[in-house]
Amino acid sequence: MDTKHISRAPHDVLAEYLRDDLSEVNKLIRARMASEHAPRIPEVTAHLIESGGKRIRPMLVLAASHLCGYHGPYHHHLAATVEFIHTATLLHDDVVDESAQRRGRATANLLWDNKSSVLVGDYLFARAFQLMVECGSMRVLDILANASATIAEGEVLQLTTAQNIDTTEDQYLRVIRGKTAALFSAATEAGAVIAAAPDPQVQALVAYGDALGISFQIVDDYLDYGGAGDGIGKNIGDDFREGKVTLPVIRAIAAADGDERAFWARTIGRGNQREGDLDHALELLERHGTMQATRAQAIAWSQRAKDALDPLPDHPLRQMLRDLADYVVARVN
Amino acid sequence: MDTKHISRAPHDVLAEYLRDDLSEVNKLIRARMASEHAPRIPEVTAHLIESGGKRIRPMLVLAASHLCGYHGPYHHHLAATVEFIHTATLLHDDVVDESAQRRGRATANLLWDNKSSVLVGDYLFARAFQLMVECGSMRVLDILANASATIAEGEVLQLTTAQNIDTTEDQYLRVIRGKTAALFSAATEAGAVIAAAPDPQVQALVAYGDALGISFQIVDDYLDYGGAGDGIGKNIGDDFREGKVTLPVIRAIAAADGDERAFWARTIGRGNQREGDLDHALELLERHGTMQATRAQAIAWSQRAKDALDPLPDHPLRQMLRDLADYVVARVN
């Protein structure tokens, strides 16, 4: 499907279709992030929660529950839950290390920003936990508990693979499942489970969320080496400077000759970077065709996401989810 | 009761009585903190979980459940749960406080880094969440979700009351409920609930855990101005240097004349401290009798904890919990 012919972005189409639900979800988010006694909490979260987040994860919950015939009301609680978990992980991701600062990484974070990020993240996670409990489904709690563990394990793994030029594609896949796909698939699975969907439908939506999340994250990692100026708010080369070992680099290291391997060992492995290194890295990615290979991987996962939806009933939302999978990779076209 | 006549510390008596249970809990803790894919996780947590923690919170779960006639097996899961939550908050606290020492050892964030402390804390919290789900009790999940929110809210409130010399005793109480009492009372409540105890017993154990936790934290805050050299691994004056506004200081500020208020405004409010300031602070606490008043508060809460146990059946564990409440304040005698 050629997404260039779609006049509106699929997430906008979804948001329009789910407008009334999203309005309820937003009300719930605002009500539950409030804290009578600690006014800093909404101060810290408001900028994250209000500032143009696309609400992809809540929409996945809502779409999955409707696709499986659910009529509420707990899909709103679950949608708010996944947005809170997502926001909590963003806040914890913001925590900056003094050691990282010492390595010269530019950051404006003061100490209290670190403190607030950690504790307000914890608060949002606790609020998410309360929202899930209100849904009253032990199976949903199980799904989200397992997703939380996968997310945290993936984040720790990312920490230990950073600067490790021997990182494998398997490890990379585990990291991005934790970073992105675990919450996507928990969102679609929980939406199906709350609707008491039959198992093949639940499994179809798990597979969709997982593949969509993987595709989404591979695209993100691709764009970090080639997405300048597309408005995603990321600078080209951030991952390179931080020593993150993502798919384009893993492929380039696998294809490297001796000199090239020494280059990666110095720049990524030891974090010793000079002027011109990013340009040379980009050149190596092009030389070995790893940008094309990364793009192909993203497209393959997007296709897998679309195919996963086959067992689901014919429904406008099924097409919208397929369009969403196309849209994710449209960013690399 | 005069604790000087007790030959063994009450937590050791409890640990002996609960020995078989604690052995199961320790097995569960070791099994669940493992991570096949992210070996840093047990590296970071082993440090905290193995290093001489007294397992007070797990023992509260076990004691409460046995007092209410429970014979297992989910008290072990719950006991491991509260220890994981406790350890997660310590890890997150280490980021927040920049503390140099915890339990007399270098903190995880100095040995590894802030980011590991945050993410491994998140992982332990997720593992705790999985353990609770296995217990299969929605009411227990509700108790622990609410406790998590109270803990996080209290931590954020502590952040906003730091360096605020107008902090009230009410705010202080809310902070220490979050810091300590919320998890103590969730431990005793969950232990009772898993045993399907009648409501008066549940409420008795909630009140006990709450009062014990408050007493425990007031003693901690007292010792920060007077507990040098007792082996608790805390340096005298840490709270003063960090601008934490705890009960001894709140009382001293309430009794301050103009010069004294200016002193507190400079040292705590603006964090502008010089040589000799801690000695002067200690002198002011003595002058206004606020150390004695703080001690009296701790003792009153300890008494409240003991009295709360009256509705519970006559049982060796009931006396052990009473002795534990005495022991908490024995540190200030």
Image (cartoon, coloured by chain):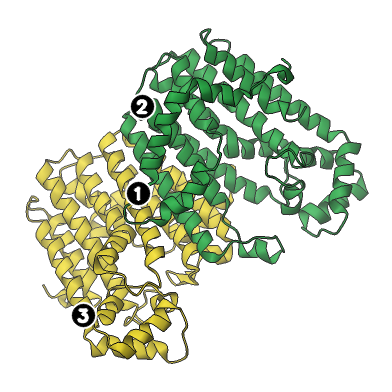
Chain colours: A green, B yellow
* Residue located farthest toward the top when viewing the structure as drawn: A314
Instruction: Please tell me how crowded label 3 is: few (under 14), some (14-19), or many (20+) other residues with Cα within 10 Å.
Output: few
Q: Are marks 1 and 2 on the same chain?
A: no
Residue A23 percent location from the top left of the image: 43, 30
Residue B39 percent location from the top left of the image: 58, 49
Q: Residue at x 61, y 46 (%)?
A: A157
Residue B148 percent location from the top left of the image: 35, 49
Chain letter for the residue marked with disc 3 in the picture = B
Q: Residue at x 47, y 48 (%)?
A: A45
- Residue holding disc 2: A74
SS state under label 2:
helix
- Residue holding disc 1: B149
* Residue located farthest toward the front when viewing the structure as drawn: A7
Q: Are marks 1 and 3 on the same chain?
A: yes
Within the image, what quadrant is residue A255 found in? top right
Instruction: Please tell me how crowded label 2 is: few (under 14), some (14-19), or many (20+) other residues with Cα within 10 Å.
Output: many
Chain letter for the residue marked with disc 1 in the picture = B
Q: Residue at x 65, y 19 (%)?
A: A304
- Residue holding disc 3: B333
- Position of B4 with respect to A203 (left or right) is left
| A140 or B33, nearer to the observer | A140
Of the 4 image quadrants, the one containing the N terminus of chain B is bottom left
Of the 4 image quadrants, the one containing the C terminus of chain B is bottom left
Q: Earlier in the sequence, mark 1 or mark 3?
A: 1
| B90 or B5, nearer to the observer | B90
Chain letter for the residue marked with disc 2 in the picture = A
